[in-house]
Image (cartoon, rainbow, N blue to C red):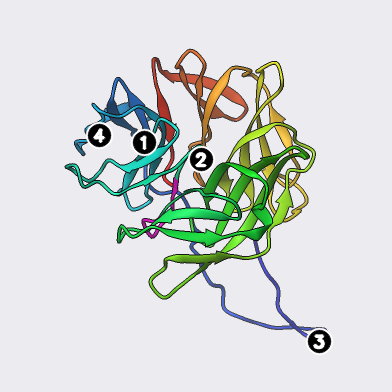
Amino acid sequence: MPVDLYNGTSRLAVDAVNVKLPATIVQAMFLKDDQLYRIDEDGRPVEHDLPVDLATLDPTALAVSPATKPIVVRDGTDRIVNVSVDGEDRPDIEGPDLAAPSVDKFGNTWTSGGTNDLRVLPASGTEVTVPAEWLGGRKVLSVSVSPEGARIAIVSHAPSGTQVQVAGIVRNDDDVPVGLAPPLTVAGPVDGVEEARWSGLTTLSLLTRDRDGVSGVWTAGVGGQPGAGGQSRQLPGLTDVQQLAAGVTDRGLLVVTKDGDLEHEETGVWQPLVEDVDLVAYPG
């Protein structure tokens, strides 16, 4: 998008600058029969060359670092494990009702925490808590860090309803998160949100579910941007989605249905890719 600079009413003549915007650059991965696969540039599944031992785990969520490692899974609902590390000394996070993890560009693994905070496992392996007083009294359902690592999207629930909020991330000199900025509430008209993932620099993809268990897939703008992608809109075609994966990429959305079908969204049409899939994730 072009930007014009002015000094008063005089337009300034400046040289054009090519800005490389943040994007999801690593391929999406999925889990099938305890084996990890990646989706290549042609949309074909390729067995991942990193040995990952899941024999003793019950994977219920998958997250991949934009830097390829770490690869983490949620084991049941009360443990998140770095499976790209061999042996019994794998770094992990333990606690009740942990949200599906998100791994940022610095290798930090994010999930939900207790009251008023999030839990983060840095690449160093020493867990930290990130305070967020505005989450007080709310159950965190989903966390997703943006590709540039400066923002986080959080879905939380309370008796008053579900909220989707985006906040800036405050980090120390080692890029370890130490706090969050005040949040911006987005996707206000969308009810029953379970999961939010970044699908553009100013766009989130949302997975919703109503009281009858019928799912919906939406996109919602961040920051109130008008025009394309700025307003919440529902994507037609699927009502049995179990999991959603999105990235800041032109590859489109990926979903896993109730029957284990991995499907790819392209210009509003869902195309089947692989059957009997357990989990899917874009990096982030």
In the image, residue 231 lies at what x, y percent? 76, 43
**Disc 1 or 3, which lies upstream in sequence?**
3
Q: Earlier in the sequence, mark 2 or mark 1?
A: 1
Q: Residues within 10 Å of mark 2 (few under 14, many from 20)?
A: many
Q: Point out which mark residue 8 bears.
A: 3
Closer-to-camera residue (218/242): 242
Q: Position of residue 92 (x, y in %)?
A: 33, 46
The residue identified by callout 4 is 48
- Disc 4, SS: loop
The disc, 4 or 1, on the residue closer to the chain's N-terminal end is 1
The quadrant holding residue 239 is top right
Number of the front mark, 4 or 2: 2
Q: Tell me: 79 left or right of 88.
A: right
81 relative position to 22: left or right: left
Going 68% across and 57% down the picture, which residue do you hit?
134
Pointer 3 or 2: first along the chain: 3
Q: Give how far apart the Cα atoms at labels 4 and 2 are.
A: 25 Å
Which residue is nearer to you in this view: 200 or 34? 34
Helix, strand or loop at disc 1? loop
Dot 4 amino acid type: His
Q: Check if mark 3's residue and mark 2's residue have beta carbons within 8 Å.
A: no
Who comes first in sequence, dot 4 or dot 3?
3
At label 2, which amino acid type do we have? Answer: Ala
Q: Quadrant of the N terminus?
A: bottom right
Residue 55, image x and y in percent? 23, 26
